[in-house]
Image (cartoon, rainbow, N blue to C red):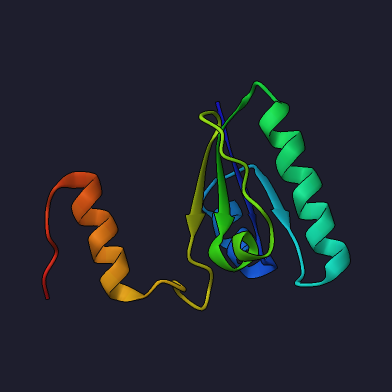
Amino acid sequence: MKIVVLGDKDTVLGFRLAGVHETYSFEDTTHEIERVRNKIMELIEREDVGVILITERLAQRVEIPDVAFPIILQIPDKYGSLYGEEQLREIVRRAIGVEIKR
């Protein structure tokens, strides 16, 4: 199964350097947002895609379909998380049952 990354050019470049082979970069324009929607639908239909990583800022601009497979995860971009540290702690606490403290 493949991991696919959708995001801004800098975030995508980081994942390419980390070894992710299939990445797509998009700019924050109306035309590009329509391309993102189309790309997400295309990736969902493919059987070889297991995980789609999409930056939080990009995900805010498009409606993420509620599908069981592939797994679609929102990730921070080069500017950091939109949700803030406290919400990230809560997500980790719910996911693994451990509270992270400073």
Name the residue located 67 percent from the left edge and 32 percent from the top edge.
44
Query: Percent from the top left, x then y, of residue 70?
Result: 56, 31
The quarter of the rendered structure image containing the N terminus is top right
Query: Percent from the top left, x then y, of residue 94?
Result: 22, 50
Work out whether residue 93 or residue 46 is closer to the camera in this orientation and state it.
Answer: 93
Work out whether residue 46 or residue 67 is closer to the camera in this orientation and state it.
Answer: 67
Name the residue located 65 percent from the left edge and 21 percent from the top edge.
47
Work out whether residue 10 or residue 63 is closer to the camera in this orientation and state it.
Answer: 63
Q: Quadrant of residue 80?
A: bottom left
> Is 73 on the left or on the right of 42, as rendered?
left
Please say if 64 is above or below 26.
above
The quarter of the rendered structure image containing the C terminus is bottom left
Query: Percent from the top left, x then y, of residue 64?
Result: 62, 49
Please say if 96 is above or below 49.
below
Work out whether residue 92 or residue 15 is closer to the camera in this orientation and state it.
Answer: 92
Name the residue located 70 percent from the left edge and 35 percent from the top edge.
43
